[in-house]
Image: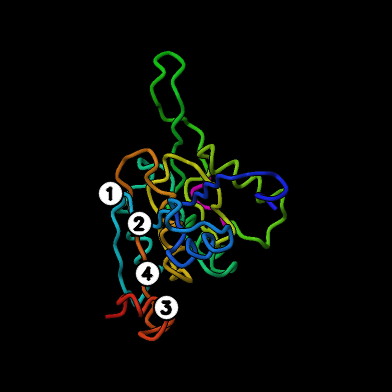
Amino acid sequence: VLRECLGIRCFLGLTATATSATARDVQQHLGIGRENGIGVGEAGIPKNLQLSVSMDVDRDKSLLSLLRAWNFGNSGSGIVYCTRREESERLAGLIQREFPAIPTPEPSENTGKSKRKAANFVVAAAYHAGLAASERRRIQRDFMANRIRILCATVSFGMGLDKPDVSGIFHFNIPGNVERYVQEVGRAGRDGRAARCHLFLQPQVGGKGGFWGRFGVFG
């Protein structure tokens, strides 16, 4: 249709996280041969992202320890990714109880520099597809405006997100595939500063024969 009806002769397809197989599939459907200039590259992890993994008996306790070490009050925003809606609600409540509300930064009228506002913001909130659309929009607006510091979210959050000060991505559950993992950690560190990305391993999910096991994640 593009060629015959619209007369388009040049195609450019761009994405940040397509695997080689996906790129070849797009190439085939668009009728683009390798000799015509298609480029397929491996997904890269930005150098300012500090990746870590752990296998913990008590993931709740370990997550809270990571958040304390991360010092989120002075380190921008963070996202905790979960696979289930009820888990995102539970973790948001846990984080909200464990950490006191802290002042949110706002520009000073006199100097233009950041100062601490006396009013407190919400430390953590849950975001998932089970919420009403209006509630999801409100939560996302508050997160973008730093009125919510940590978002405990399912995969329904993040597509098209561009928030430069996200400095922590914590995967409480293992993503379904490596492509999604690369996509989600790529939402951190867009301001060029160092960002922490931690993955909690669960050997009972997939195991050595599963998707992540084929990448040597479980030894």
**Cα gap from disc 2 to disc 1, whole angstroms:** 12 Å
Query: Which element type, helix, strand or loop, lies under badge 2?
Result: strand
- Counting from the top left corner in percent of width and height, residue 182 is at 41, 59
Relative to residue 178, is residue 9 drawn left or right?
right
Could you tell me if the residues under marks 2 and 1 are in contact, i.e. CB atoms within 8 Å? Answer: no
Q: Quadrant of the C terminus?
A: bottom left
- Counting from the top left corner in percent of width and height, residue 80 is at 46, 58
**Cα gap from disc 4 to disc 1, whole angstroms:** 21 Å
Q: Is residue 15 above or below residue 60?
A: above
Residue marked by disc 1: 47
Instruction: Indicate the amino acid at tag 3.
Output: Phe
Residue marked by disc 3: 211
Which mark sits nearer the N-terminus, 3 or 4?
A: 4
| Disc number for residue 37 | none
The residues colored magenta run 122-126
Q: Nearer the viewer, mark 4 or mark 1?
A: 1
Which mark sits nearer the N-terminus, 4 or 1?
A: 1
| Disc number for residue 200 | 4
- Counting from the top left corner in percent of width and height, residue 67 is at 36, 55
Q: Main secondary structure of the magenta part?
A: strand
**Cα gap from disc 3 to disc 4, whole angstroms:** 16 Å
